[in-house]
Amino acid sequence: MTIHIDHHPDQNHAGDEIVEKNQGNVKEQETEHVLDGGFVAPHTNSFGHTFRDYDAESGRRRSVEDFYRTNHIGQTVDFVKRMREAYGKLNRTEMSIWECCELLNEFIDESDPDLDEPQIEHLLQTAEAIRKDYPDEDWLHLTGLIHDLGKVLLHPSFGELPQWAVVGDTYPVGCAFDESIVHHKYFKENPDYDNPSYNTKYGIYTEGCGLDNVFMSWGHDDYMYLVAKENETTLPSASLFIIRYHSFYALHKSEAYKHLMNNEDRENMKWLKVFNKYDLYSKSKFRINVEEVKPYYLSLINKYFPGKLKW
Ligand SMILES: [Fe+2]
Ligand SMILES: [Fe+2]
């Protein structure tokens, strides 16, 4: 079976209708869903070039559905707590925000030479697109730059976590999995699904407890949130909110889990909606001159972060 992941530059998260079609004897699956890790490579890029074939073990051409099956089975309260505990120690390395951008850029390029756009360009395109429309919100420009840096979890020096524990849509654990979550049916195989402490509307939470107090499925979002918070960034709470929930599509798209939000969350939600338009649509073809914009972003990093951060 050949699995194609169609790359739609303006749709990197949800909207993953998988269409199966038969072409002679070869059954193909096409999907508009491209995982947010940059590791699920499209079969052809936007210039029409065909990608190299990868062997089955590489996993790059696994279907999105397969990805979510593994994700939904593995993301338990216990798993999330262990990940937060382990990565929350921030004892792996020290580096600046810009060094992390470069690290992400290098290794994602290395592992997937067919990607038509370096990771740093996605970060800068998001940031620059926001900057154009919201010139005075410098914190939002910087949020654009750093929102995906947690993907370093895929790097060998960060434990080389599997994709299902780094990218993709996120959702709360510790309460019932909302039906609007993509490929919901696979939660039936998650050990928490039948646990009466975790499978009710509120589960271990209370009404209006605030999303800060909710365990989210583990991935690059929560990790980067921890890094920013623990390194005492002076970015506003809306920025931390964007970083932690930018893949929480059940909330942005379906308004699920609103009963867990508090007033601050509702305020911050407005900014997340602004941000998400840019995260999705900035994946266009305008090129960024990295060296040209770098001084501006270094000044923002300097304003909101210490020189070296613990990771
Ligand atoms: Fe992301
Ligand atoms: Fe992103």
Image (spheres, rainbow, N blue to C red):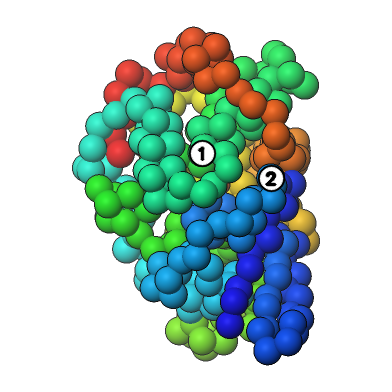
Position of residue 14 measured from the top left corner of the image (x, y, whole percent)? 70, 60
Q: Which residue is mark 2?
A: 47
Q: Residue at x 43, y 71 (%)?
A: 55
Q: Is residue 282 above or below residue 293?
A: below
Position of residue 112 measured from the top left corner of the image (x, y, whole percent)? 45, 50
Q: Is mark 2 within 8 Å of ligand 2?
A: no
Q: What is the three-letter code of the residue carrying label 2?
A: Phe
| 3D distance between C-alphas at marks 2 and 1 | 18 Å
Left or right: residue 159 compared with residue 229? left
Which disc number belongs to residue 119?
Answer: 1
Left or right: residue 63 compared with residue 48? left
- Asked if the residue under mark 1 is in contact with the one under mark 2, i.e. CB atoms within 8 Å, the reply is no
| Image depth: mark 2 or mark 1 in front | 2
Q: What is the three-letter code of the residue carrying label 1?
A: Gln
Occupied quadrant, residue 126: top right
Position of residue 214 measured from the top left corner of the image (x, y, whole percent)? 52, 57
Q: Residue at x 69, y 20 (%)?
A: 131
Q: Is mark 1 within 8 Å of ligand 2?
A: no
